[in-house]
Amino acid sequence: MNANSVSPIPNYEYFLELLEAHDQSHLLHFYSELSVTEQKELLAELNEQDWDTLGQLIERYGKAYTAAVDHYDISPAPYYPSEPSAELEAKYKEAIKVGKSLIAAGQVAAFTVAGGQGSRLGWEAPKGTFPATPIREKPLFQVFAEQLKKAENDFGKAIPWYIMTSPMNDADTRSFFKDHQYFGLDAKNIMFFPQGTLPSFSKEGKVLLREKAHLALNPDGHGGSFKALKKSGAIQDMKRRGVEYISYCQVDNPHVKIMDPLFIGLHALDGADMSAKMLPKAHAKEKVGNFCLIGGKLGIIEYSDMPNELAEATSDKGELLYNAGSIAIHMISLAFAESITDDPESLPYHRAVKKVPYLEVETGDQVQPKEPNAIKLERFIFDAIPLAQHAFILETDRVEEFAPIKNAEGSDSPATSRDLQTERAARWLEHIGHPVPRKADGGVDAMIEISPLTASSSEDLKGLELPEIKPGDKVYL
């Protein structure tokens, strides 16, 4: 792929005039103290920003901000069930057939959002490098790479993999893959690119400096992935390869089925622009987005925004009416993704007030705020769903597809993820009639790990020579 031509960066005088017009000239306060290299770095960061748009965002979300009060026409969202009803059995079989044919034709790409660091896990490296599996402790990236390698072997077709990093972890991510020989995949089919960033700004509307030569930048959210796909050239690369569908996931969930023929096939059969998987919520206040019909359009209401009376509403059978929880797994048609990138303001921004370390311009001191002091803006990918002409959600099983690693301890931690990985492996074995020891409470009395290269479902285990599993064993297949 040819590199895009790069325009020269304007000089100091240009930015001084520009920033004065936007009341942000303090960003050049330390310019004369910087080395030539640092001056270039600062001007490059300033040049990355659209200052007219940023000024509008600061005005809207800064000191003049008032939270919008929306009175939605909200109703529960319909969805395809994980187990098909009698009238859906034929469609599910056809969908699986179509999905497999699309993968084999090279029309499906994998897209993984991996911009985060593992800091919350005590892992000072890209989150995708975190050791995730119960026995071999394979990093998350390896789990996904092995899934794709098996799919390539099964379908006889290379699958392009697009990985969105962040400016913070891009170099480390690339090095990690190179050091591990791309986990057996062809490097030509893997494309890394960083997501965009936005400056954090004070409640008074002043863009913050992180240090004398650098703005306080924050990632623009997973909703920024549409913009990053276009800017990086990924969309053009997909077109060149004949890709029509994008399988989207986030890096922290090792149970994601990156190439799921049923999901891919339903998306194609329905002519959907964007589709999503959901889980029945564990309880009314589970911290997941809520799929709803909002004014008749499928969308998501964040758990923090969901009115209590709706979150806790139940049917005559005592079941939650709003039980469809988002797990950030999507199918996206390439044409739809491109239409989003053609309209940069199509996705809304979300405002968060956070503690952001900054450089005090008056004194030159670094400040570590004890209270939230700054506004961060980001976009969420699920805000594209209401823009789709057609969208649907597919129910899936919690054990089968959701074992996230987000927190160091407690829920969604490495420990709970390893337990879920063992439980899924046990279910697959039991499904084909292979005995697995269980504890009195029903938990698995062993540690089991099945390589994604070995199986992507219980069906792949049939006919294999499997070991006897005794209580307390550690078994790697």
Image (cartoon, rainbow, N blue to C red):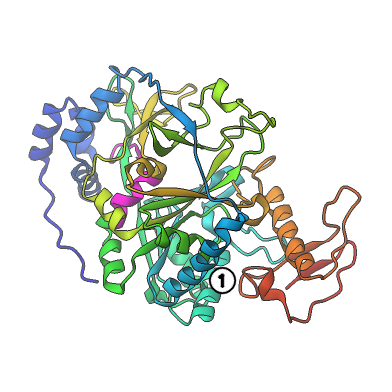
Q: Quadrant of the N terminus?
A: bottom left
Which residue is located at x 14 percent, y 62 percent?
Answer: 5
Which residue is located at x 85 percent, y 65 percent?
Answer: 473
Q: How far from the left and from the top, in percent, is residue 147?
A: 55, 69
* Residue 214 inside the magenta-drawn segment: yes
Q: How far from the left and from the top, in percent, is residue 274?
A: 39, 51
Q: How far from the left and from the top, in percent, is residue 381?
A: 39, 45
Residue with the most extreme front position: 87
Residue type at mark 1? Glu
Q: Residues within 10 Å of mark 1 (few under 14, many from 20)?
A: some
Nearer-the-camera pick, 368 or 374: 374
Q: Quadrant of residue 23?
A: top left
**What secondary structure is marked by label 1?**
helix
Relative to 248, is 379 on the left or the right? left
* Residue 331 inside the magenta-drawn segment: no
Q: Which residues are magenta?
A: 211-229
Relative to 16, is 375 on the left or the right? right
Nearer-the-camera pick, 186 or 169: 186
- Identify the residue position indicated by label 1 in the image: 146
